Image: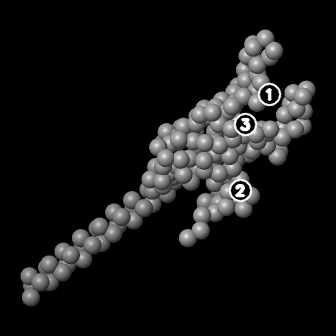
């Protein structure tokens, strides 16, 4: 009887110790704003896919994270040149890559303008997936312009692009 009681107490103690350790691990896994979520690495960063703000109201960048960190997408923006002033232009990604939380992309050239982005994808202020600013793109955006003589002028700036809320995204939610 004493032996079975001792085994029972030992098992209860072990279960309690194991449960406390698991709870602490779960608390440690909750990402803070500015940190990538652990699920980002497990899902290959797919939860970063979505529509983000761009430089001006009405402009946006669409990011789609595919297999092995390949990133496709496009920038939709208003033209600023003489021939395209105010016209809505789409510039698809020529290349894009997500490595952990590091994101880089380069757009195709449209009307002698292209963009390079180098930065990170981070958790933003949104509380849950689908909320506005759940993720943000932070980094350096370089806009490049080529003139008639093929001389390139580049302008870099630090940017923060916020993810649009899920209901504003043009991509339908996946249904089961």
Quarter of the figure that contains the N terminus: bottom left
Location of residue 74 (image quadrant): top right
Residue 167 shows in the view: yes
How much space separates mark 3 and mark 2, taking CA atoms?
18 Å
Whether residue 129 is situated above or below residue 100 in the rendered picture: below
How much space separates mark 2 and mark 1, taking CA atoms?
27 Å
* Proximity of marks 3 and 2: CB atoms separated by less than 8 Å: no
**To which residue does mark 3 refer?**
91
Q: Which of the two discs, 2 and 1, labels the residue nearer the N terminus?
A: 1
Crowdedness near tag 1: few (<14), some (14–19) or many (≥20) residues, C-alpha within 10 Å: some
Q: Secondary structure at mark 1?
A: loop
**To which residue does mark 1 refer?**
111
How much space separates mark 1 and mark 3, taking CA atoms?
10 Å
Which tag is nearer the camera, tag 2 or tag 1?
A: 1
* Proximity of marks 2 and 1: CB atoms separated by less than 8 Å: no
User: Which residue is rendered at x = 68% and y = 57% of the image?
Assistant: 171
**To which residue does mark 2 refer?**
169
Q: Work out whether residue 39 or residue 61 is closer to the camera in this orientation and state it.
A: 61
User: Which residue is rendered at x = 71% and y = 53% of the image?
Assistant: 164
Residue 152, image x, y percentages: 73, 16
Q: Viewed as shown, does residue 72 lie left or right of 109?
A: left
User: Which residue is rendered at x = 29% and y = 67% of the image?
Assistant: 18
Q: Secondary structure at mark 3?
A: strand
């Amino acid at each position: 009887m004493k032996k079975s009681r001792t085994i029972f107490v030992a098992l209860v103690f072990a279960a309690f110790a194991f449960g406390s350790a698991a709870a602490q691990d779960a608390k440690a896994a909750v990402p803070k704003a500015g940190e990538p979520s652990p699920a980002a690495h497990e899902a290959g960063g797919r939860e970063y896919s979505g529509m983000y703000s761009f430089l001006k109201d009405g402009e946006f960048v669409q990011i789609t994270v595919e297999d092995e960190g390949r990133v496709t997408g496009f920038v939709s923006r208003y033209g600023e040149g003489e021939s395209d002033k105010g016209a809505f232009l789409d510039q698809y990604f020529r290349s894009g890559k997500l490595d952990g939380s590091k994101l880089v992309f380069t757009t195709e050239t449209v009307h002698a303008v292209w963009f390079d982005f180098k930065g990170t994808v981070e958790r933003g202020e949104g509380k849950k997936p689908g909320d506005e600013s759940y993720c943000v793109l932070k980094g350096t955006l370089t806009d490049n312009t080529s003139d008639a003589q093929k001389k390139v002028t580049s302008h870099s700036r630090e940017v923060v692009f916020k993810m649009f809320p899920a209901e504003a995204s043009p991509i339908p939610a996946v249904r089961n």
